[in-house]
Image: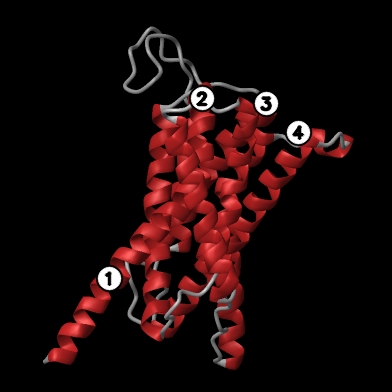
Amino acid sequence: MKPYLLFPFGFKIIGVILLVPGIIFAYLYFSQNYELPPIKNNPIVGLYGPGSYSFIDELATTFITVGLLFIGFSQLRNERGSVHKLRLKALYWAVIINCLWIALFWMLVVLRNFMNIPLLWHLETSVTVIYNLFALLLLFIARFYYLLYKYGKSKRSPALRFLPYLPYNLIGKTGVAVFLLIAFAAAFIKIDDKYSLYLYLLPVFFLLWIASWSKRQSELGTIVRLKAMQIAVYINYALFIMATWVFYDINYLFALFFGLLSLQITFLITYYVMIYRASKVVALFNMG
C-alpha cells in the first residue's frame, strides 16, 4: 500500500511546536481560569452575535488538534507501504476503541437515568465528550509507534480483527435503520421526551456496523476500509475545528455530541462510495 494523504515529514516538527502553546492555553483556561483580553462588542461570524469574547479555549483546542494531526499523519523519513499500512491499522484500532468507549459511556448515561446508582451520577457528560475528541488521536499515535516498534523487531504486521458479519453487522444496520425511522417519524408525530434518552444508544449500533466484516470481505475491501477511515478522520476533525469557532455554549455541546457520531457516519459514507468505485474499476479491468 502506497503512502496515502500524508503530510510531509517536516510537519511533525510543526505539530510538536503547535502542541506547546495549545497545552499552555489549556492549562491556563481549565486550571487557572485565565482568559485572554476579550474582543468587545464585535459581531462575530457564527452563532456568537455581538458581545465580548475571549478565545483562549478555542485557541487551545485548535492548536492541540492540529498539532496531534500533524504528528500522527506526517510521513516518516523512509515511509514505505508496509509502514503506512501499520499506520492505518493503528488508526482503525484507535477509532474502534474510541467508539467502544463512547458506546459504553452513553449506555451508562442511559442506565443512570433509569436506575438510582449513586456512582453513575458523577458522570460529567460535557467534559467526557470534549476530552474524548483528543483521546482518539492520542490512542492512534501511541498505537502506531508501538506497532512500529514491534514491526522493527519481528517484521510482522498484525492482522486486523473484525466481528463476524452475522449477527453483528446485521444488528448494527438494523439498529441504525430503526433510529432513522424514529427520527423521521418525530418530524410528524409528537414523541415523549423521555424516549430521547435512547438516542444515546445509537453509537452502540454504529460501533457494531463499523467493527464487523462486510458481507463479501476481500483484501481490496480491507484496504478501502483503511483508506476510508483516514479520510473520515480528516473530515471529522475539520468539522470539529470549525464547530469550535462557530458554535458556543449549548450549541457547541450539541455539535460535540454530533461529532461523536459524525466520524462513524462519515466513514460509512466514504467507505461505501469508495468500495463502489473500486468495484467499477475492477469490473472494467476484468472486461479488458
Q: Evaluate if marks 2 and 3 touch, with contact meaning CB atoms under 8 Å apart.
A: no
| Mark sitting on residue 190 | 2
Other-residue count near label 1 (Cα within 10 Å), few / some / many at <14 / 14–19 / ≥20: few
User: From mark 3 to mark 4, how far is it between C-alphas?
Assistant: 33 Å
Q: Of discs 1 and 2, which sits in the foreground?
A: 2
In the image, is 114 to the left or to the right of 186? right
- Name the foreground residue: 135 vs 256: 256
Color encoding of the figure: secondary structure
In the image, what residue type sits under mark 1?
A: Tyr
Q: Earlier in the sequence, mark 2 or mark 4?
A: 4
Q: Which residue is mark 4?
A: 113
Q: Position of residue 107 (x, y in %)?
A: 70, 46
Q: Earlier in the sequence, mark 3 or mark 1?
A: 3
In the image, what residue type sits under mark 4?
A: Asn
User: From mark 1 to mark 2, how far is it between C-alphas?
Assistant: 38 Å
Q: Which residue is mark 1?
A: 276
Which secondary structure lies at badge 2? loop
| Mark sitting on residue 32 | 3
